Amino acid sequence: MSQIAPPPAVERTPVAGDCPGCGRTALGEYDVVGETGWTHVVKCQHCLASVRRTPANRLGPITLLVDQL
């Protein structure tokens, strides 16, 4: 019988504040990829309302040595 690997998980950093959509204090900060590329977001972890979206590194969580120069 084969084992099924768990899905990949994104590390989410808790952020202080209230959600403008549902009012809860469950905000998380992490990188997501979409049609415009990688974006650094702060989203409510309950209703998924976006609080802040800013462009992220071109490769998301991957940092190249040339990017550190």
Image (spheres, rainbow, N blue to C red):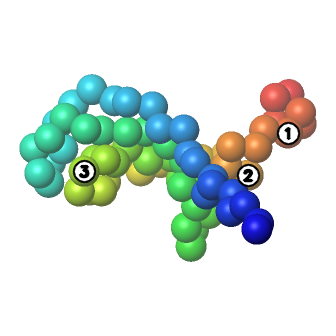
Give the amino acid at mark 2: Leu
Spatial CA span between label 2 and label 3: 27 Å
Of badges 3 and 1, the one in the foreground is: 3
The residue closer to the viewer here, 57 or 10, is 10
Where residue 58 appears, as percent x and y from the top left, is 71, 52
What residue would you read off at disc 3?
46
**Does dot 3 land on a helix, a strand or a loop?**
loop
- What is the x, y in percent for residue 25? 19, 35
Residue 58 visible somewhere in the drawing: no
Count of numbered circles in the view? 3
Residue visible at 21% across and 31% down?
17
Quadrant of the snapshot with the N terminus: bottom right
Left/right placement of residue 66 relative to residue 9 reads right
Quarter assignment of residue 3? bottom right
Q: Is residue 47 above or below residue 24?
A: below
- 60 with respect to 55 (left or right): right
The residue that appears at 27% across and 26% down in the rendered structure is: 16
Residue 7 screen position, x and y as percent: 61, 57
- Residue type (three-letter) at the residue carrying disc 3: His
Q: Are marks 1 and 2 in contact (CB under 8 Å)?
A: yes
Residue that mark 2 sits on: 59
Q: Earlier in the sequence, mark 1 or mark 2?
A: 2
Cα distance between the residues tagged 1 and 2:
9 Å
Q: Is residue 10 above or below residue 14?
A: below
Query: Which numbered mark, 2 or 3, is in the foreground of this view?
Result: 3
